[in-house]
Amino acid sequence: MRFKVLALFLSGCFIAMTARAQFDCTGPVSSLALSPNGTVQVSVGTFGVWYLCELSNTDTYGGVTFTTDGCKGIYAMLLTAQSTGNSVTMDFSSSDSGGTNGADCTALGSWVQPSSAPYYIYTLGNTQ
């Protein structure tokens, strides 16, 4: 009986995980800035400028909480990627699967805090 309950639970988790769509925005860090209040602003590739997080305040939007320590790590990673010419990828949740660098990335807008927050950010080695 326990095995059946566990199997049903795990299959429900798997279905929930696979139903969650995402889209990725990948490219070089074409712009990176800090506002006077410590807001990290970034543009990846040719997409708009996005307000990601604040170095001095915990911020939650789009279902993601950015702590000050997490924001400092994100800023350091973006700064390193920009200075070394490496690309970054930001994974966003979405109601539909948009793939990589599709219309969803452009639809996030420019000079905004995206309605869908990036839940995972990582760098890619320099492929040049």
Image: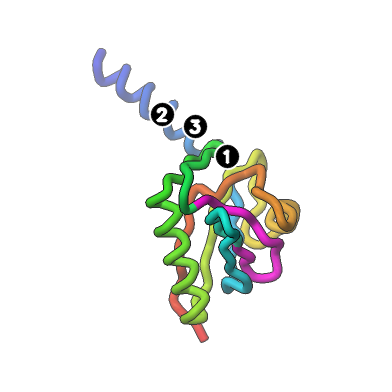
Question: Which amino acid is tagged 3?
Answer: Ala
What crowding class fits label 3: few (fewer than 14 Cα within 10 Å), some (14-19), or many (20 or more)? few
Looking at this view, is 60 or 101 the one in front? 60
The earlier-in-sequence mark between 1 and 3 is: 3
Q: Is residue 76 left or right of residue 42?
A: left
Which region of the structure is painted magenta?
Answer: 42-54
- Total count of labels: 3
User: For this rendering, which residue is in front, 110 or 1?
Assistant: 110
Residue 128 vs 103, above or below: the answer is below
Task: Name the chief secondary structure element in magenta.
Answer: strand
Q: Which mark is residue 6?
A: none
Q: Residues within 10 Å of mark 2 (few under 14, many from 20)?
A: few
Disc 2 and disc 3 in contact, CB within 8 angstroms: no
- SS assignment at label 1: strand
Relative image position of residue 64 (x, y in whole percent): 51, 40
Q: Which mark is residue 11?
A: 2
Q: To which residue does mark 1 refer?
A: 61
Does residue 10 show up magenta in the picture? no
Q: Quadrant of the N terminus?
A: top left
Please state the horizontal and vertical placement of residue 10, each as a whole percent of the image. 36, 28
Q: CA distance from mark 2 to mark 3?
A: 9 Å
Q: State the image quarter where residue 12 is shown.
A: top left
Residue type pointed to by label 2: Ser
Tell me the tag on residue 16. 3
Which residue corresponds to the image point at 33% horizontal and 25% vertical from the top-left? 7
The alpha-carbon separation of the residues under discs 2 and 1 comes to 29 Å
Please name which of the two marks, 2 or 1, marks the residue nearer to the observer. 1
Q: Residue at x 71, y 62 (%)?
A: 48
Q: Amino acid at mark 1?
A: Tyr
Q: Which callout, 2 or 3, points at the residue further toward the start of the chain?
A: 2
Say whether residue 51 is magenta.
Answer: yes
The colour scheme of the drawn protein is: rainbow
